[in-house]
Image: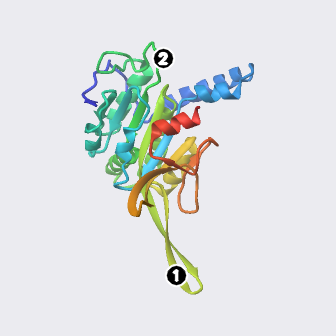
Amino acid sequence: MISRNFIFFSQTLDMNFGPWHCDFASAQLANHKARNKMPIKLHEAIKRTNCKILCYGGSGTGKTTLIGTLPAGRVLVLAAEDGLLALQDLERDDIEVESIADWKQLSSVVTAIRSGSFRWSDGQPFVDKSGQIPWLVVDSVTEVSERLNQQLKADDAVNGFGAYNGTHDRTLQMLQVVRDLPCDVLFICKEKVDEEKIKVNKEVIKTNSFSPLFPYAALSAAVPYLFDFVLRLTVEDEVIAGKKVATRLLQTGRTSAAVAKSRSSALSLYEPADLAALVAKVYQ
């Protein structure tokens, strides 16, 4: 793992991510028109699609450790979290880490990738001539959104609705822009736990429901619609040879208790917490 400070060419930063969204919308419309003019083999189209994943989980489930299971190849981790010690123990030299303290730093990195000015530590461009698709990881998008919300609240201390609208709109725009970069993308997210009480035969039963955590409930509900894969990282106890063993699993489909989804029929409801194996299974 390599941790360093990146050097960028001079860029005009846009904290709203607005123009990027318009650019990508126009490009997507043009691509849609082009696709309608030519036959597409479904199997080939699936193979050529970059992987865009949102993964969430509770504290201690190993979300950061999960980054180490990504397929071999260049991985750029944009780290808003402090707990990246798990990455230092990985025997991988293809992971580079950049700390992002605020919204501006995230915008700077994304701008550099989009403009082609980004360089890895060895001087190579983000997508080199070999055509190998790199991975971009944001850990965690919850922290980035929360910091933006705090900033907007400080700037708009009188009217709390300004912070709500700004956080909601800018977070969704940021997710769309980063998701549509020319690479595979993994967003790490904290877990939101809602306690529900159900009355059954005069007895009150408490149950929990789980979803990605963002500053506002409406934002938590909207984000999963942006992704083909929303995975919940969970730890389940299994009895193996008479001993209880904790097993880390990725939930790939929605249940009554948890938000999750996969648009690939190749995945089981629960898969081992190994992203390289999961991606290989989807695109085999």
Relative to 93, does residue 67 appear above or below in the rendering?
Answer: below
Label 1: which secondary element: strand
> Is 70 left, or right, of 98 in this rendering?
right
Relative to 46, does residue 213 appear above or below in the rendering?
Answer: below
Pair 2/1: label in front = 2
Residue placed at 54% from the left, 62% from the top? 257
Count numbered badges in the picture. Answer: 2
The image quarter containing residue 256 is bottom right
Label of residue 263 in the image? none
Q: Position of residue 199 (x, y in %)?
A: 56, 80
Of 7 and 230, which appears nearest the observer? 230
Of 265 and 136, which appears nearest the observer? 265
The image quarter containing residue 22 is top right
Q: Position of residue 29 (x, y in %)?
A: 65, 26
Residue placed at 42% from the left, 60% from the top? 241
Label of residue 204 in the image? 1
